[in-house]
C-alpha cells in the first residue's frame, strides 16, 4: 500500500550499559527485536526506556556493549530507513500541520511532488485530512501525536521507534493510535514502542519488561503470564473497605475496584471456601468469586516486588 514489503529489520542489543555520572540508566541490557514485529519496551517512569531508545537511534553512545540494526552498527544505518518519535512533541507550534510535514520532509531533500503525494497519504492514514491548515499549537494531544507520526513516516521508513507516544493521551485517541500502528506493521514496518501502560504490553507481539535500567524478562505477553506463580481471583463483595482482605492468610495482595477486588492468592484446593469463611468471620458480605487470568501488571509486580515475587511463593 504505502510501504515496501521487502527485507525488514532486526535489532540486537548486546550487554548495553549507559551511565550518567553515578546514575546507572541502562545496566547490561540485552535483547533482540525480530523483523516485522511490534516490540514493546515496558516499565514505569525512570526504568530506562527513553535512554534505551536514544541509544538505539544513535542520539547517545553506549558506555559498554553494542547495538546493531540489520546487522550493522546504529551509526551506519541509513537515517531515511528509520522513523523516530521522541517522547516530547518536538514540532513547531506556530506552523500548520501541512507546514510541519513539509518542513520535516524537506530535511531529507524529498522533491515537492513526492512530499505532496506522501503528505496526502500520511494525512489520510492518521485521520488528519481536513485539518491541514490548523496550527500545531491548537491540536489536542492525540492529534499532535498523529502529526508527529505523519512527519516521521514521510521517508517511508522500514523501522519506527516511538517513545511513549500515547502518554497522557485520552483512551479513544490511544485506541486510534494503536490501530494506525497495526496497519503500519501489516505493511511491513518493524515497530519498537516504549510505554508505561501495562495494558499496552498486551498489544505487542513481544515485550521487554524493564526496571531500573535492567531487563527483567523478554517474551510474548502470553508466555510472560506463565511466569506468574500464584493465581488471581476476582471477588465481588458489597463493601467499601479497600483493606477488607488485608488480614486474610490466603491473600498475598489485593486491589480494590469499588465493590470488587482482585486478589493474589496462594494455590489451595479449597480457596473459595476459605475466602468465604474469612468474610463470614469478619461479619462481612457474601462473596462472588471467580478465577481470572493474571494481567501484565500482575506479572511486573511479581518480578520486581520481593514481598510479592517468586520468593514469596517458594517459601510456602
Image: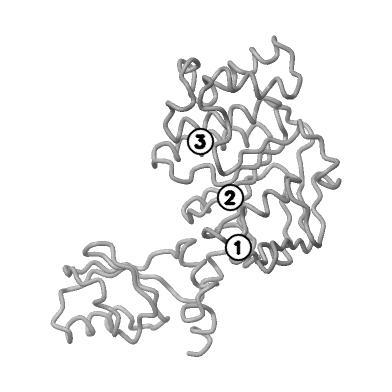
Q: Nearer the viewer, mark 1 or mark 3?
A: 1
Task: In the rendered structure, find residue 66 and report the number of the disc placed on it.
Answer: none
Is there CB contact under 8 Å for labels 1 and 2? no
**Relative to 66, is 143 above or below?**
above
The residues bearing labels 1 and 3 have C-alpha atoms spaced at a distance of 25 Å
Of the image marks 1 and 3, the number of the one nearer the N terminus: 3
Residue at image x 69%, y 42%? 36
Q: Is 33 situated above or below 236?
A: above
Decide: few, some or many residues near mark 1? Use Cα within 10 Å; few <14, some 14-19, many ≥20. many
Where residue 179 is drawn, which disc sits there? 3
Name the element at disc 3: helix
The circle drawn on residue 194 is 2
Q: Which residue is the site of mark 1?
A: 210
- Does 212 sit left or right of 294 as displayed? right
User: Secondary structure under badge 1?
Assistant: strand
Helix, strand or loop at label 2? It is strand
Q: Tell us which disc is closer to us: 2 or 3.
A: 2
- At 59% from the left edge and 27% from the top edge, which residue is drawn? 150
Comparing 174 with 48, the one in front is 48
> Residue 239 placed where, x, y %?
17, 70
- Whole-number angstrom distance, CA of label 2 to CA of label 3: 16 Å
Amino acid at each position: 500500500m504505502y510501504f515496501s514489503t521487502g527485507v525488514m529489520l532486526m535489532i540486537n542489543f548486546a550487554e548495553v550499559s549507559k551511565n550518567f555520572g553515578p546514575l546507572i540508566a541502562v545496566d547490561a541490557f540485552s535483547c533482540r527485536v525480530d523483523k516485522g514485529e511490534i516490540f514493546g519496551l515496558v516499565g514505569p517512569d525512570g526504568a530506562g526506556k527513553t535512554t534505551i531508545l536514544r541509544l538505539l537511534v544513535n542520539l547517545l553512545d553506549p558506555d559498554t556493549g553494542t547495538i546493531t540494526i540489520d546487522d550493522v552498527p546504529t551509526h551506519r544505518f541509513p537515517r531515511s530507513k528509520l522513523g523516530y518519535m521522541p517522547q516530547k512533541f518536538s514540532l513547531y507550534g506556530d506552523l500548520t500541520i501541512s507546514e510541519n510535514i513539509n518542513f520535516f520532509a524537506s530535511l531529507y531533500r524529498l522533491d515537492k511532488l513526492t512530499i505532496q503525494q506522501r503528505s496526502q497519504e500520511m494525512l489520510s492514514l492518521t485521520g488528519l485530512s481536513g485539518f491541514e491548515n490548523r496550527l500545531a499549537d491548537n491540536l489536542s494531544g492525540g492529534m499532535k501525536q498523529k502529526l508527529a507520526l505523519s512527519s516521521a513516516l514521510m521517508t517511508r521508513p522500514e523501522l519506527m521507534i516511538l517513545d511513549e507516544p500515547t502518554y497522557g493521551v485520552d483512551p479513544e485517541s490511544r485506541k486510534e493510535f494503536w490501530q494506525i500502528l497495526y496497519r503500519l506493521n501489516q505493511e511491513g514496518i518493524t515497530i519498537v514502542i516504549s510505554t508505561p501502560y501495562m495494558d499496552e504490553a498486551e498489544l505487542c507481539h513481544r515485550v521487554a519488561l524493564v526496571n531500573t535500567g535492567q531487563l527483567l524478562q523478554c517474551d510474548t505477553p502470553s508466555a510472560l503470564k506463565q511466569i506468574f506463580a500464584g493465581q488471581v481471583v476476582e471477588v465481588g463483595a458489597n463493601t467499601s473497605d479497600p483493606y477488607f482482605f488485608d488480614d486474610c492468610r490466603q491473600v498475598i495482595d489485593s486491589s480494590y475496584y469499588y465493590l470488587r477486588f482482585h486478589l493474589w492468592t496462594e494455590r489451595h484446593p479449597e480457596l473459595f471456601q476459605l475466602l468465604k469463611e474469612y468474610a463470614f468471620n469478619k461479619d462481612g458480605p457474601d462473596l462472588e468469586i471467580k478465577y481470572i487470568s493474571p494481567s501484565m501488571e500482575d506479572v511486573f509486580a511479581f518480578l520486581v516486588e520481593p514481598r510479592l515475587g517468586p520468593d514469596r511463593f517458594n517459601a510456602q
